[in-house]
Amino acid sequence: MKPSVYIPGLDGMRTISILLVILGHSGLTFVPGALGVTIFFFISGFLITNLLLIEQDASDRIDVKAFYIRRYLRLMPEMAFYVAVGLVAGLFLNALPSLLSTLAALFYFTNYLKAFHVSGEVMPFVTGHFWSLAVEEHFYLTWPLAFSVLAPNYRNMLGALLAVLVVCFAWRLIIVTQGLFPASYIEFASDTRFDSIAFGCICAVLFRKNPAFIARLASARWLVLFAGAALLFVPSLWRTVFGLNETFQEAARYTVQGAGFILCFIFLYRAPPSWLQALIMRILETPLMRFCGRASYGAYIWHFAVIYIFMAAVGSLTPEEMSLTNKLICAAITATVSMILGHYSGKLVLGPFASLRRKFGSHVQVKSPIPVQ
């Protein structure tokens, strides 16, 4: 049976992430929507690596085949249903998406179509936002295998993950300084974004395998919080406030934000108890935040369709063209409708696969897997 790995606060963080994405995609350009995706990446790396660590610690092996099957059964049903709805709607509206964009969505290479500005999408059931799902799946094609080899020595595991951080940063720097690819390549390509997931993996490894090191950092809780928050949001100010080079910003911002996430996690989960820590956790654990967090995957899949339907209703070609009032209305409607669609797609589309997923569950059962205090 797959172990229970509920970690307090993560559903609430997912809610914040999807709201950032929806606000940004609704034309509110002052909202860091891209940060929402980066948060998703970090949480995914943290949670999946925590699962692998639990399995390794309990049974001294990783069932890689079962991992892949569980992963596919968790993500594909809702995605395939969305694509099917889009194809059926396209038949009636005489607006079928291209075969390439449809295959890209189903076989996880939408991110490279985005990176090179290749599009065969049609409104409203676009699939361009599946790029982030492609990045995650490309990472998880290799990470469980690498983990099973590196698990006996966590320092080797950390070394490999740190190498991912260095290589991704260096590769981004080479791309932007040499102009090797379009600027969009930095944001969408798997080989330039793996480190956003690897930071979450590193955080999970340190939490479970080197708690003494984490405790030393956590003892300076307010400094850790301030530094983490600054690293998360300073990259968006580099050009406008500090006038730093745009090339440096594009190459370094994911590295800087990843370090910021680790520090924020240390404050929230390992720092000595404080009023602010308790308040943040209380907010993240409210029923509404947990509900929206659980529906966030489905909401992410559906949210662009809701946005484009609203745009058609108000006669706008792009979200940025809408008035501020319409942008705010669009964001509110999209958040509400997407969460409802995400909730019911989880129940009606993903739900029937629950027993099959349990069949391929982890071969260990753990009573207390939560790596937090």
Image (tube, rainbow, N blue to C red):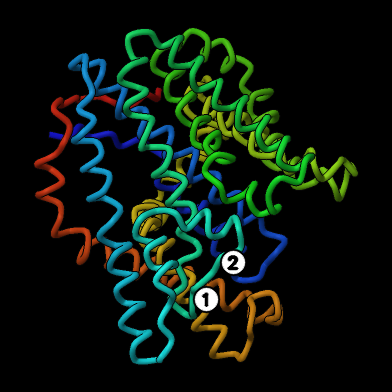
- Depth order, front residue of 311/83: 83
The disc labelled 1 sits on which kind of residue? Ile
Q: CA distance from mark 1 to mark 2?
A: 8 Å
Which secondary structure lies at badge 1? helix
Q: Is 209 left or right of 320, judged from the image as shown?
A: left
Q: Is 278 left or right of 301, judged from the image as shown?
A: right
Q: Which mark is residue 307?
A: 1
Compared with 204, 151 (above or below) is: above
Picture quadrant where residue 300 is located:
bottom left
Compared with 270, 313 (above or below) is: below
Q: Which quarter of the rendering shows the N terminus? A: top left
- Depth order, front residue of 304/284: 304
Q: Which quarter of the rendering shows the C terminus? A: top left
Q: Which residue is mark 2?
A: 25
Image x and y of residue 276, in percent? 57, 35
The disc labelled 2 sits on which kind of residue? His
Q: Is 74 left or right of 120, judged from the image as shown?
A: left
Compared with 86, 133 (above or below) is: above
Residue drawn where x is 66% and y is 25% of the image: 222
Residues at marks 1 and 2 touching, judged by CB atoms closer than 8 Å: yes
Image x and y of residue 325, in percent? 67, 80
Residue drawn where x is 48% and y is 16% of the image: 158
Compared with 21, 141 (above or below) is: above
For label 1, the crowd category at 10 Å Cα-Cα, with few meaning under 14, some 14 to 19 and many 20 or more, is many
Image x and y of residue 184, in percent? 66, 54
Q: Is 143 left or right of 177, judged from the image as shown?
A: left
- Depth order, front residue of 296/182: 182
